[in-house]
Image (tube, rainbow, N blue to C red):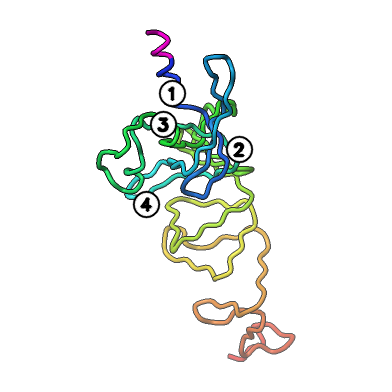
């Protein structure tokens, strides 16, 4: 009886570490990371499994999603369904046509599962290459990236903003209202190109005061 049970269990697939062979953004070709050991002590090379659905955290009808790029050799966790998935993958929730159970062909892949990488034990951390995003228990957010590009119709900051590096703008700059709405600049200011105006009046380098005699001062202006 024990041998019969062991023989039956040997054909049951539940969960295995796997490796990505190829990935097209929807399904993957994978292989179990470990070979199968037979009852006589021999090992059987794990076969490749094709068209394996790759599962990601997805919600709100697919509008909310978290994914990572998968490359050949990346580790995944393989889960094997207790029922045939063919009908379900084609969009049907009806009973499966095939009675097979825990078969290698009815496999899900879940990235990315492998012990070993040293994790940040204090913060919620997202890392890819040299870029990191860290959220501390205090709620403070730190972003470290070589370059950051924000494409938004409008960006609003409801807090003071400090810029420690060079501030460059290409589409003009304007502001109005608020307490202490004047601009204070410590150090020199250099303006190049275009007219410098105040309340619609030119106060740039080509602005001249009428009635001032060359070489004179305000006392030279006739009353």
Q: Position of residue 47 (x, y in %)?
A: 54, 33
Q: Position of residue 3 (x, y in %)?
A: 42, 10
Q: Secondary structure at mark 3?
A: loop
Q: CA distance from mark 3 to mark 4?
A: 32 Å
Of residues 203 and 15, the one nearer the viewer is 15
Q: Is residue 106 above or below residue 187?
A: above
Q: Closer to the N terminus: mark 1 or mark 3? A: 1
Q: CA distance from mark 2 to mark 1?
A: 26 Å
**Residue occupied by mark 3:** 103
Name the mark nearer the viewer: 2 or 1. 1
Q: Closer to the N terminus: mark 2 or mark 4? A: 4
Q: Is residue 130 above or below residue 78?
A: below
Numbered label attached to residue 73:
2
Q: Secondary structure at mark 2?
A: loop
**Residue occupied by mark 1:** 11
Name the mark nearer the viewer: 2 or 4. 2
Q: Based on the displayed image, in which of its 4 quarters is residue 132 positioned?
A: top right
Contact between labelled residues 3 and 1, with CB atoms less than 8 Å apart: no
Contact between labelled residues 4 and 3, with CB atoms less than 8 Å apart: no
* Mark 4 Cα shell of 10 Å, populated few (<14), some (14-19), many (≥20): few
Q: Based on the displayed image, in which of its 4 quarters is residue 133 positioned?
A: top right
The residue stretch that appears in magenta? 1-6
**Residue occupied by mark 4:** 63
Q: Position of residue 205 (x, y in %)?
A: 67, 80
- Please give the count of numbered marks on the rendered protein: 4
Q: CA distance from mark 1 to mark 3?
A: 8 Å
Q: Closer to the N terminus: mark 2 or mark 1? A: 1
């Amino acid at each position: 009886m024990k041998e019969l049970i062991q023989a039956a269990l040997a054909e049951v697939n539940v969960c295995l570490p796997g490796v990505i062979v190829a990935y097209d953004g929807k399904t993957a070709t994978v292989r179990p990371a470990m070979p199968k050991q037979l009852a006589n002590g021999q090992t059987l090379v794990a076969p490749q499994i094709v068209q394996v659905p790759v599962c990601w955290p997805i919600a709100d009808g697919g509008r909310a999603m978290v994914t990572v790029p998968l490359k050949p050799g990346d580790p995944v966790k393989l889960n094997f369904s207790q029922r045939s998935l063919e009908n379900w993958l084609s969009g049907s929730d009806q009973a499966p046509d095939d009675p097979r159970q825990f078969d290698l062909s009815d496999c899900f892949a879940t990235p990315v599962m492998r012990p070993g990488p040293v994790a940040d034990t204090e913060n919620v951390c997202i890392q890819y290459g040299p870029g990191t995003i860290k959220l501390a228990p205090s709620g403070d957010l730190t972003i470290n990236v070589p370059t950051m590009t924000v494409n938004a119709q409008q960006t609003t900051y409801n807090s003071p903003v400090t810029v420690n590096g060079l501030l460059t703008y290409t589409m003009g700059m304007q502001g109005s209202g608020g307490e202490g709405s004047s601009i204070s600049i410590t150090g020199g200011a250099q303006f190049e190109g275009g007219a410098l105006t105040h309340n619609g009046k030119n106060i740039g380098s080509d602005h001249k005061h009428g009635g001032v005699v060359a070489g004179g001062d305000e006392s030279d202006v006739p009353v």
